[in-house]
Image (cartoon, rainbow, N blue to C red):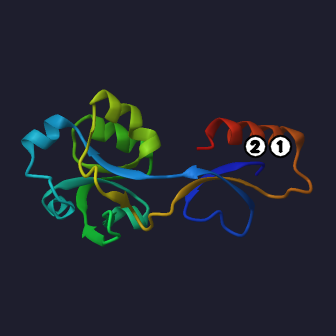
Amino acid sequence: MDLAIRLAPEAGNDFIGRKLFAARYRVVATRAYRQAAPALDRPEDLRRHRCLRFILPEFRSRWMFRDAAGLVTEVPVDGDITLSNALVLHGCALAGLGPALLPEWLVGADLAAGRLVDCFPMLEAGGGSFDSAVWLLYPSRKYLPNKVRVTVDFLTTLLKK
């Protein structure tokens, strides 16, 4: 492996890691879904919904929320659709199949255009942690091929927030 991009709270110890940006998550759904489904005003309301879930354990069974005062609430979630691909999960949310916990960088344009609605705009949302980030990982600084060094520099400049 020359280079990998990883979403995680930490880069890990097996590779050199460069943090590109923090990954923030939002619970999103379409306006049509929100109008047709039971109320979705508080995180606890998710218990009455068939959520669209990512297959990773920290995203599959419970979602976490933190308010401005730092109070954390964990809400168990369930649903019939559990996927390993965030792009397909995003497509399911756009199709109005239910609420989904997705990263802001994936749903930002949809929120701005009104295709999706942030269900809890005043709360931070997350799976297993609120400290997730996007990391570039590579095996060594000492023997880093030029093509990898150029790619790391390019992505760092392009994506660093």
Residue at point 47% right, 41% down? 105
Please give left or right for residue 141 compared with residue 4 in the image: right
The residue lying toward the viewer, choosing from 80 and 118, is 118
Dividing the picture into quadrants, the one containing residue 18 is bottom right
Q: Residue furthest front?
A: 69
What residue did someone put label 1 on? Answer: 149
Q: Is residue 126 above or below residue 87?
A: below
Please tell me how crowded label 2 is: few (under 14), some (14-19), or many (20+) other residues with Cα within 10 Å: some
Q: Residue 35: horizontal and vertical position, in percent?
A: 9, 40
Please give left or right for residue 1 compared with residue 85 in the image: right
Q: Residue furthest right?
A: 142
Please tell me how crowded label 1 is: few (under 14), some (14-19), or many (20+) other residues with Cα within 10 Å: some
Give the distance between the C-alpha atoms of the residues marked 2 and 1, in whole angstroms.
5 Å
* Residues at marks 2 and 1 touching, judged by CB atoms closer than 8 Å: yes
Dividing the picture into quadrants, the one containing residue 43 is bottom left
Q: Is residue 80 above or below residue 160?
A: below
Please give left or right for residue 14 compared with residue 7 in the image: right
